[in-house]
Image: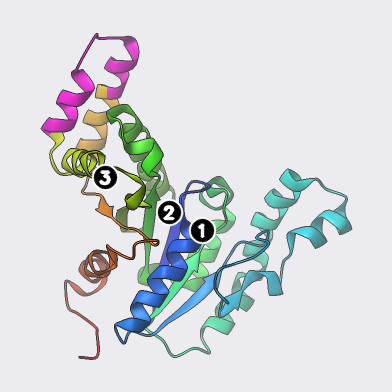
């Protein structure tokens, strides 16, 4: 049974690069995976997707045919994903593989906040799906920014109702000190609480602490896995986390 891994995150968080790099790493480990591009507006990709939504939907064609600007065309294209989901799923079924690595649209809201995404996930197989959420390092390197990013993680998880792996993307862009601090915050809620409470108490500080307490109570507060597609580290940890989600920790590598 193939598993669906949806790479999701804000624009610029590195979804496409991560999809490509994780696929390359999986191949190096003797793991079979198929890449799927679900972004109808992407101009170019660093990999050749095995399944490409642009074979069904293209943003430039929608703009020309419907007389829409980029924003309107992106919204329509996102909704058209649902109309083509069954055809794409039929193509996916022709592959004998262990994983589908699904590169979601660049603008996260086009996938997360449109009802079409639920149809796509259900059609591809909800029970065999998980999210790999990419947190942007520029946002999480301060305590308040980490809370903001975790709120996006929580919103995404609640919208899709899928298990997820929480990833710190482009971790090589952080200094060793910043990386150590952010990972510590994700492991130790007391350390994050103390960082939030440092300095003068403002209405924003109170709000950040309230959000933090809520995130901890609902179970989305969890360790960030540092990953770098550029430096090629962290993929083993992603893979292990995925195995915990799907196989209770059983390694599916052929050796």
Give the Cα distance between marks 3 and 2: 13 Å
Crowdedness of circle 3 by 10 Å Cα count: few (<14), some, many (20+)? some
Tag in front: 3 or 1: 3
Rendered residue at 51%/58% (across/down): 118
- For mark 3, give the secondary structure: loop
Q: Earlier in the sequence, mark 2 or mark 1?
A: 1
Magenta stretch, main secondary structure class: helix
Colouring scheme applied when the structure was drawn: rainbow
Question: In the image, which residues are magenta?
Answer: 190-208
Label 1: few (<14), some (14–19) or many (≥20) C-alpha neighbours in 10 Å:
some
User: Is residue 202 in view?
Assistant: yes
Q: What's the CA distance linking mark 3 and mark 1?
A: 20 Å
Q: Which residue is mark 1?
A: 118
Distance between mark 2 and mark 1 Cα atoms: 7 Å
Work out whether residue 194 or residue 214 is closer to the camera in this orientation and state it.
Answer: 194
Q: Residue at x 44, y 90 (%)?
A: 96
Horizontal side of 188 relative to 182 (left or right) equals: left
- Residue 126 percent location from the top left of the image: 41, 67
Q: Secondary structure at mark 2?
A: helix
Residue at image position (30%, 23%) is: 208
Q: In the image shown, does 81 or 168 lie closer to the viewer?
A: 168
Q: Which mark is residue 31?
A: none
- Name above or below for residue 171 compared with residue 127: above
Of mark 3 and mark 2, the one earlier in the sequence is 2
Instruction: Please provide percent x and percent y for residue 165.
Output: 30, 57
Whether 82 is among the magenta residues is: no
Which residue position holds label 2? 160
Is residue 140 positioned above or below 224 on the image? above
Labels 3 and 1: the sequence-earlier one:
1
The residue carrying mark 3 is: 220
Element assignment for label 1: helix
């Amino acid at each position: 049974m193939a598993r669906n891994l949806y790479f999701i995150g804000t624009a610029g968080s590195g979804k496409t690069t991560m999809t490509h790099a994780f696929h390359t790493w999986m191949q190096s480990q003797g793991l079979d995976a198929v890449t799927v591009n679900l972004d109808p507006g992407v101009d170019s990709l660093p990999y050749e997707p095995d399944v490409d939504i642009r074979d069904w939907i293209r943003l430039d064609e929608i703009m020309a045919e419907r007389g829409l600007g980029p924003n309107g065309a992106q919204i329509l294209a996102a909704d058209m994903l649902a109309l083509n989901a069954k055809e794409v799923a039929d193509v996916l079924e022709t592959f004998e593989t262990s994983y589908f690595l699904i590169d979601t649209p660049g603008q996260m809201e086009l996938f997360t906040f449109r009802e079409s995404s639920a149809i796509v996930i259900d059609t591809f197989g909800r029970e065999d799906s998980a999210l790999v959420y990419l947190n942007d390092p520029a946002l999480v390197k301060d305590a308040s920014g980490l809370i903001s990013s975790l709120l996006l993680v929580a919103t995404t998880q609640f919208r899709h109702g899928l298990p997820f792996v929480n990833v710190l993307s482009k971790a090589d862009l952080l200094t060793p000190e910043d990386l150590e601090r952010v990972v510590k915050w994700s492991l130790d809620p007391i350390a994050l609480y103390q960082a939030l409470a440092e300095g003068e108490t403002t209405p924003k500080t109170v709000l950040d602490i309230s959000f933090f307490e809520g995130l901890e109570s609902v179970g989305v507060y969890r360790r960030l896995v540092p990953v770098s597609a550029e430096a090629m580290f962290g993929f083993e940890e992603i893979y292990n986390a995925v195995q915990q989600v799907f196989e209770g920790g059983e390694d599916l590598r052929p050796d």
